[in-house]
């Protein structure tokens, strides 16, 4: 079976994130916001700098960048999903963030002026793109000399046990081939191949805390994992939920919640002067 055309892949990604725009990062599971805030902090943004958030979603990194660069700085958020763009632009306006603009564009092909930014961040975005290396090269062009890039991905790509559980229900054609995102070295080499220098990795643990399996399903359907559900026949969804419920027992804590540890990878790099 051939690879899905990039245009079709982009359309599918946009459709999934349009569906989740209203609930994204808003179901009582701190996830995208703490990751994005850690990523932004690792880049040490300074007041007055110009930043771009590539695949900004509902603004987890966007608003952290806006706080850091202040009203004298400038932050541009782009996202493929019209729903995400509309909701996040409204949030920025409600916060009175005049230094922020949010526009609908493809993170893989941003189409923004070269050398326009001091900082570029992409939090949990790059592995969704049909051509990650081409995207990274485009991001390199966006940065001014001395600019900095920050990416966040899973330290254990695919979220480990979720691959095992969902894999029982997915068609054989859905299984992904090995990718650069399987290791720190793979991501570093990919970023280096795009022209970045001083590529380095930081990792940190983050627990997903869930009340019960219904809470897990609500969270799972509120972000990009919704696309995995769509590849499984609807009549088998109760089986998925039952399999996850069984597996979650491994993570039950004394207070009755489930606490699932995840490793988060930050990949940081610079554009040479």
Image (spheres, rainbow, N blue to C red):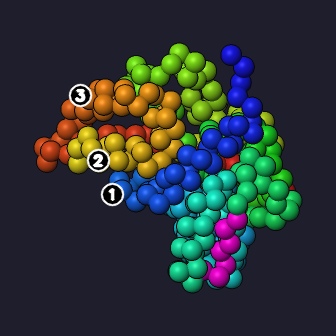
For the record, the magenta segment spans: 97-103
Marks 2 and 1, Cα distance to the nearest angstrom? 9 Å
Residue pictured at 85% horizontal, 62% vertical? 113
Q: Which residue is mark 1?
A: 28
Q: Which residue is mark 3?
A: 246
Marks 1 and 3, Cα distance to the nearest angstrom? 22 Å
Secondary element at tag 2? helix
Seen from the viewer's position, the closer of residues 173 and 111 is 173
Q: Is residue 229 left or right of residue 255?
A: right
Count of numbered tags: 3
In terms of sequence position, does the residue under pointer 1 or pointer 3 come before the other? 1
Q: Quadrant of the N terminus?
A: top right
Seen from the viewer's position, the closer of residues 144 and 5 is 5
- Local crowd size for mark 2, using a 10 Å CA cut-off: few (<14), some (14–19), many (≥20): some
Seen from the viewer's position, the closer of residues 99 and 2 is 2
Secondary element at tag 1? loop
Q: Are marks 2 and 1 in contact (CB under 8 Å)?
A: yes
Query: Height in image: 173 above or below 204?
Result: above
Asked if residue 41 shows in the view, the reply is no
Query: Height in image: 222 above or below 193?
Result: below
Asked if residue 83 shows in the view, the reply is yes
In terms of sequence position, does the residue under pointer 2 or pointer 1 come before the other? 1
Marks 3 and 2, Cα distance to the nearest angstrom? 14 Å
- Local crowd size for mark 1, using a 10 Å CA cut-off: few (<14), some (14–19), many (≥20): few
- Does the magenta segment cover residue 99? yes
Q: Quadrant of the C terminus?
A: bottom right
């Amino acid at each position: 079976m051939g690879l899905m055309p990039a245009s079709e892949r982009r359309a599918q990604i946009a459709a999934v994130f349009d569906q989740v725009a209203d609930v994204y990062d808003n179901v009582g599971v701190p996830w995208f916001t703490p990751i994005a805030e850690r990523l932004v902090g690792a880049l040490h943004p300074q007041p007055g700098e110009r930043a771009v958030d590539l695949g900004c979603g509902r603004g987890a990194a966007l608003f952290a960048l806006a706080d850091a660069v202040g009203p004298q700085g400038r932050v541009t958020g782009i996202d493929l999903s019209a729903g995400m763009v509309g909701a996040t632009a409204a949030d920025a306006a409600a916060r009175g963030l005049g230094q922020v603009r949010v526009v609908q564009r493809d993170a893989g092909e941003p189409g923004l002026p070269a050398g326009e930014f001091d900082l570029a961040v992409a939090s949990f975005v790059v592995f969704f793109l049909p051509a990650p290396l081409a995207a990274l090269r485009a991001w390199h062009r966006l940065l001014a000399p001395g600019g900095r890039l920050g990416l966040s991905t899973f330290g254990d790509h695919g979220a480990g046990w979720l691959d095992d559980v969902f894999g029982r229900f997915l068609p054989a054609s859905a299984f992904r081939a090995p990718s650069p995102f399987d290791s720190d070295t793979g991501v570093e080499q990919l970023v280096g191949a795009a022209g970045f220098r001083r590529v380095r990795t930081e990792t940190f643990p983050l627990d997903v805390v869930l009340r019960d399996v219904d809470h897990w399903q609500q969270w799972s359907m509120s972000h990009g994992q919704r696309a995995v559900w769509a590849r499984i026949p609807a009549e088998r969804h109760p089986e998925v939920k039952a399999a996850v419920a069984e597996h979650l027992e491994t993570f039950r804590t004394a207070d009755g919640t489930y606490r699932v540890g995840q490793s988060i990878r930050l990949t940081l790099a610079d554009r040479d002067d």
